[in-house]
Image: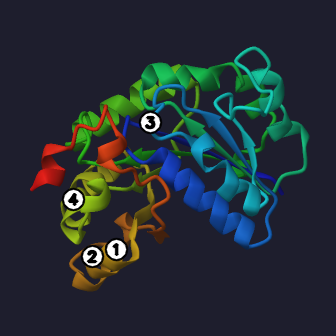
Amino acid sequence: MKKVVILIGNYGSGKTEIALNMAVKAAGEGKRTQVIDLDRINDYFRMSDHVKLLDDKKIDLVSPTFVGAGITQTNMPAAVGSAFAQDWDLVIFDVGGDPAGALSLARYRMDFDTLSPDQLEVYDIVNVRRPMSETAEKILKLKEEMEGFARQTVTGFIHNSNLQTWASADDLREGYAVVKEASELSGIPVVYTTGRQEYLQQFLDDGGWDSRFIGTPMEMVTYMQRSWDTFDGGIVSPIARR
């Protein structure tokens, strides 16, 4: 039975990285997999930059930023229709990183309504290192705003606290308490805790956490890594200089 996963979350929460990891894992298990790129907010971390990886894994990509695919903003809705009309095992929607970006989902509400409840999951990706996600209250406020724009209800949290290439187990430790509180206040389960293998395992080995607020550990491969030297005209990040 087809499974559709919608990934929403604050700008910089890691939606595209998680979408890539989910898609590659599913394709490796022999599942027919499609990724729908609805993130019109962030042109720096673009799904279409990894089209060779997706093509090698036989993952179908629908994205208007994929030059040469013939997909534009005008015919994008018809291309997205293939997610519902064709026989996929898993379809992943990577949605824009703010409430306004979530509006892109609303136009497909009738299509989502054709799915049974057990076919659709809406995951809110939380990185407490990003603005507007530092506290449980801020997480829930932003979640409610995005739900209103997207006309979808969040079914699970993905804990993805990190500082990109400077990430450590400390990020997961600090983020765990915040995501746990958000889960307790809302009743929304934590479905995944993510991280690169070394610091995710360190966090898990440390213990002191409640498994109800961990979900399934998801080891991440870093596909979206960028060199600061190629960003913003060659200006190097102050963090990178340290």
> Can you identify the residue that label 2 sits on?
203
Q: Is residue 113 visible?
A: no
| Nearest to N terminus: mark 4 or mark 2 | 4
Figure quadrant of residue 164? bottom left
| Nearest to N terminus: mark 3 or mark 2 | 3
> Can you identify the residue that label 1 sits on?
200
At a point 43% along the width and 49% down the height, the residue shown is 188
- Inspect the image, locate mark 4, and give the three-letter code of the amino acid beneath it: Ala
Neighbour tally class for label 3: few under 14, some 14-19, many 20 plus, Cα within 10 Å: few
Labels 3 & 2 near each other (Cβ < 8 A): no
- Inspect the image, locate mark 1, and give the three-letter code of the amino acid beneath it: Leu
Q: How is the image coloured?
A: rainbow
> In the visual, does 26 lie left or right of 233?
right
Residue 177 has which mark?
Answer: 4
Labels 2 & 1 near each other (Cβ < 8 A): yes
Query: For the view shown, which residue lies furthest in the top direction?
Result: 74
At a point 73% along the width and 33% down the height, the residue shown is 112
Labels 4 & 2 near each other (Cβ < 8 A): no
Q: Secondary structure at mark 1?
A: helix
Q: Is residue 233 above or below residue 34?
A: above
Q: Disc 3 versus disc 1: distance between alpha carbons?
A: 26 Å
